[in-house]
Image (cartoon, rainbow, N blue to C red):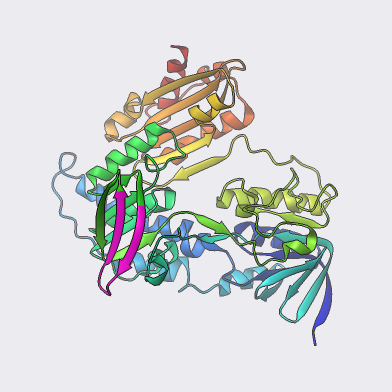
Amino acid sequence: MGETRDVDVVVVGLGPGGEAAATRLATAGLSVVGVDRRLVGGECPYYGCIPSKMMIRAAHVLAEGRRVPGLAGSSTVTPDWSPVHARIRDEATTDWDDKVAVDRLEKAGVTFVRGPARLTGPRTVEVGVTTFSARKGVVLNPGTEPAAPPVDGLADTPYWTNRDACRTAELPGSLAIIGGGPIGAELAQAFARFGVAVSVLEAGERILGPLEPEASALVSDAFAEDGIEVLTGVHVSSVAYDGQQFAVQVDEQSDGRTVHAERLLVAAGRRPNLSDLGLETVGLDPSARSLEVDQRMRAGGADGGGLWAIGDVTGKGAFTHMSMYQADIAVRDILGEGGPEASYHAVPHVTFTDPEVGGVGMTERQAREAGLDVRVGTTDLASSTRGWIHGGTGLVKLVEDADRGVLVGATSVGPTGGEVLSMLVTAVHARVPTDTLRSMIYAYPTFHRAVEAALEDLRS
């Protein structure tokens, strides 16, 4: 027979935001149950942000080694994947074991339960034979999982997702990647720099389509230098596997061709883990692509209904930092604390290719479509002395609402594009007048001095 247990809060899904919410609520003195059917910590530390950046860091070191001629002498670079795999296995994931994360949760006072969770009504969650009745409510953070497009034959093949790519101990000789978004682009360059022959197949007109087109063009040029084949505007019609190689049939501008590769990575988006949560028991649509939340992360109607949602399933950006940001808001609401409500006008994002692409707020196209009086300032990274010395490829692009005299978006591309982005995030978030930004003192010689040059370009 089942049992019912009374608690204060149940957190379903213990990715970065869910783990943070459960920990803070428990340390505030509430009785908290955290539930996850997979690894505590979510996608990010095991299959996403952290292992992929270890791969990218190693690949960048190889690229730097190859740049020694012409700058510092001569060099010979011999790639070896084994240190990368060992570092991911031993340092990042403890061989894909979450004991450290579970211990951390339980030390904070959270009761951890592993298994699939399902809502059975307002403030009630069923896990196995146990039903948890939450006095304050439930926080949903179920996250997303890799999605596969409906391509003929694909489901019958041993294709990779990002999870397989991050776990691989041996590199293939060749790799085809379906999808030229951030995941596909980052992994494409990492593997290519280790000597894998990589082809990227993108349905859109360019890779990294949501970014500014100038940024996409710079990354495409870098891919060409790395020997990565990029096919855009293509439709994958079928996939087959003969035990040795994949055959990916591509319709390219009506001229079909077949891409052959030892491995196939599908990086064509992600789907929300909403269908089996019992959302219908609280009046929500289980077939929805995302959950609508208010500015306090309440998902259960005007009074919240004792239900909060955070992370990827809110549709505000599938980023670890978004989940953490929303967790803070939900926790404060549950605890009855004050503080700012959610605002999404300055959401930052970084694609960790080389060059690195950081963006915040609106693109130029989005700003124009929103009806703003747009003014754009752009400069090459070489406009900063350090950019010129470094020989780095990049740019800074600023998107201004000319009527208000503030930035509504910005892009920073370069060796440290994500770091230069930080000052631009501040400017967009705080709506700092562009005249104030022009009056600042910019340290010399730094990459971020390109921002000063882009501000001057706004005048023209």
Residue 189 seen anywhere in this rendered image of the structure: no
Label tally: 0
> 211 left or right of 56?
right
In magenta segment, residue 239: yes
Q: In this view, does 230 lie above or below 135?
A: above
Q: In this view, does 183 lie above or below 113?
A: above
Quarter in which the C terminus is drawn: top left
| Residue at the spot 60% in from the left edge and 15% down from the top edge | 403
Residue 54 seen anywhere in this rendered image of the structure: yes
Front residue of 375 and 353:
375
- Residue 25 image point, x, y percent: 76, 60
- Residue 429 image point, x, y percent: 61, 32
In magenta segment, residue 32: no
Front residue of 284 and 333:
284
> 262 left or right of 367?
left
Q: Is residue 341 above or below residue 163?
A: above
> 434 left or right of 244?
right
The residue range painted magenta reads: 236-251
In this view, the residue farthest toward the front is 254
- Residue 404 image point, x, y percent: 62, 17
| Residue at the spot 77% in from the left edge and 61% down from the top edge | 138
| Residue at the spot 74% in from the left edge and 41% down from the top edge | 341
Front residue of 362 and 425:
362
| Residue at the spot 26% in from the left edge and 62% down from the top edge | 261
- Residue 289 image point, x, y percent: 62, 53
Q: In this view, does 179 lie above or below 102?
A: above
Q: Main secondary structure of the magenta part?
A: strand
